Structure formats: structure tokens, C-alpha cells
Image (cartoon, rainbow, N blue to C red):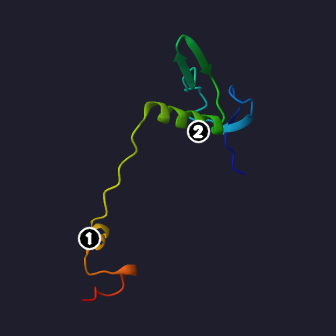
Amino acid sequence: MARRQVIELACDRCGRVETQPLKGDGKDERPRYELEVSFHGQEVKYEDLCRRCRSACENYFKNMTKQPEPEEEPNVEAAKEEESPTKRFLGMGKKAG
């Protein structure tokens, strides 16, 4: 039978209790706080976050810092087809006349 070590934690943000995989060799290598926020003199610190709250906080952070998402390269072939004067409505045939 396979075994794995997990840690049970109660989320400081929502109170949910869940188990998460224990990383490393059993030693607690995580930083003291998962999330520390200071804004206009108010501080909030969370030691433990569940998966859902961690994901939400990551998204809040990305939105606050306006981290750019990687831009996709324009599709050159699609641009050429749009510019083609020989196509008609629904891409059927050449222009009449």
C-alpha cells in the first residue's frame, strides 16, 4: 500500500480545513506567512491558506500589480485571407464584374 505524508491545516482566511501534500523531507520549509499585506497602515497576515484562497489571492495580486499576460503572435495567414479582395460573402468565389 502506498503512503504519502500530508499536513492538515485550517485556512486563516475562510476557516476551511483541508489536507495538503507535505513538501520536502518533513521539515517545515515554508515562510512564516503565506500572505502579508500592508496598505495605508493596515496589515493582514495569513499563515495558512487553503487551495481556493491561495488561488484567489494570487489572482488579486496579479490584478493589483497589472502583470501583463504574454501576447500572442498575430496569425499572418489569417490576416492575408482577410485582406484578399477576391473573396466574397462567406468566402464564396470571386467578385462579379
On the image, the x and y values in percent for residue 11 come to: 70, 29
Rendering quarter of residue 90: bottom left
Outermost residue, top side: 41
On the image, the x and y values in percent for residue 16 come to: 74, 33
Figure check: 80 above or below 94: above
Q: Amino acid type of disc 1?
A: Glu
Q: Amino acid type of disc 2?
A: Ser
Circle 1: is it few (<14), some (14-19), or many (20+) Cα within 10 Å? few
Instruction: Give the quadrant of the C terminus.
Output: bottom left
Q: Nearer the viewer, residue 23 or 26?
A: 23
At a point 54% along the width and 33% down the height, the residue shown is: 60
Circle 2: is it few (<14), some (14-19), or many (20+) Cα within 10 Å? few
Between tags 2 and 1, which lies in front? Answer: 1
On the image, the x and y values in percent for residue 46 come to: 62, 23
Q: Name the side, left or right, on which 33 lies relative to 5.
A: left
Name the residue beneath numbered marker 2. Answer: 55
Mark found first going from the N terminus, 2 or 1: 2
Outermost residue, front side: 97
Name the residue beneath numbered marker 1. Answer: 83
Rendering quarter of residue 50: top right
At a point 69% along the width and 45% down the height, the residue shown is: 3
Numbered disc total: 2
At a point 69% along the width and 25% down the height, the residue shown is: 12
